[in-house]
Image (cartoon, grey):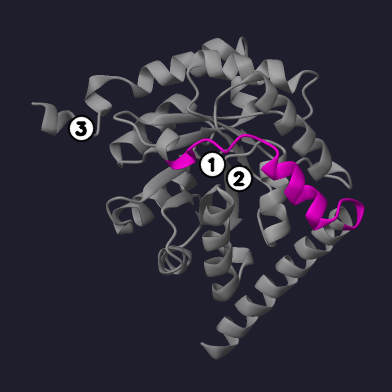
Amino acid sequence: MNRTVTASASAITALANAALARVATRQARVPLDEIKARALDRPAPLNGKEALGSEHIVVVAELDPAHAAPGQLAEEYEAGGAGVIAVPVRPGANGVGSSLTAMNDANVHTRTPLLCMDPVVSSYQLWEARAHGASLVLLAASTLHDEALVSLVERAATVGLTPVVEVCSARDLVRALRANAHTLFLRPPQYVADGSVQIQATLAKLLPLVPNGVVRVTECGSTPRRDLISSAKLDADAILVGRTHLAEGAPRQAVADLVAVGSHPALSRRREQAV
């Protein structure tokens, strides 16, 4: 048992150190005081938690940061009814920078809250995300020690951002709740190409453990429509839909179709109170 805990702690340390090294490189280029000034020069972030709370399951549309016009793509998502737009991290040496540029462009073109998917390991990233238009930030419980998780959840709220804590196991969930996280992103430990079964199995295990009042975000696998319905029936508040599913055809219509499915009266979480 002790060996397992030690190995887990070592893995967390290695992941966190690698992420901190990447952040340090960016901070060397743009010092904290400068990035903080840029952030405070912007309008206050939108209420991310509020955007994820609705009578019906909310569609979180994933933006492609490599898109030729990410701002226009974000407009299409917004027009289709996306409640939040997620901006993932691109792989490669300059991936985070280009992702932040895409998020900045999306912020200029829309009024939909943006979720920065670069997992936070340093308070610098909070100011960095806000400076580029984010309203929500991702914290991965699996890459943070308890003290860091508690500190970053608190700090994100202070900066004006909504912290979304990624949990992949019951242990992660307990740690996130102890850190006073109010918004969770529940997903399997490892994503696979045909991940619908794994995702739903993870959700069926974790969602019943989440207390009332905590926002629950899930993700879709290979079948967005079916996964959205399953997630809604498991009482999820929102579902992240990957950019590959939204790139098939017209992005606005792809989002609108999923929003329409999620808005069906049978999937309303408040249908019993309305009767």
Q: Secondary structure at mark 2?
A: loop
- On the image, numbered disc 2 is attached to which residue? 192
Looking at the rendered image, the disc whose residue lies closer to the viewer, 3 or 2, is 3
32 in the magenta segment: yes
The answer to whether one can see residue 190 in this image is no
- On the image, numbered disc 1 is attached to which residue? 195
Judge the density around disc 2: few (<14), some (14-19), many (≥20) Cα neighbours within 10 Å: few
3D distance between C-alphas at marks 1 and 3 = 29 Å
Residue 37 appears left or right of 92? left
Contact check, label 3 and label 2, Cβ < 8 Å: no
Residue at 63% from the left image edge and 39% from the top image edge: 134
Residue 5 appears left or right of 59? right
Residue at 61% from the left image edge and 76% from the top image edge: 8
Residue at 79% from the left image edge and 28% from the top image edge: 66
Q: Please state which of residues 158 and 258 is positioned toward the viewer in this rendering.
A: 158
Tell me the tag on residue 43: none
Judge the density around disc 1: few (<14), some (14-19), many (≥20) Cα neighbours within 10 Å: some
Q: Secondary structure at mark 1?
A: loop
Contact check, label 1 and label 3, Cβ < 8 Å: no
Residue 78 appears left or right of 24? left
3D distance between C-alphas at marks 3 and 2 = 33 Å
- On the image, numbered disc 3 is attached to which residue? 270
Contact check, label 2 and label 1, Cβ < 8 Å: yes
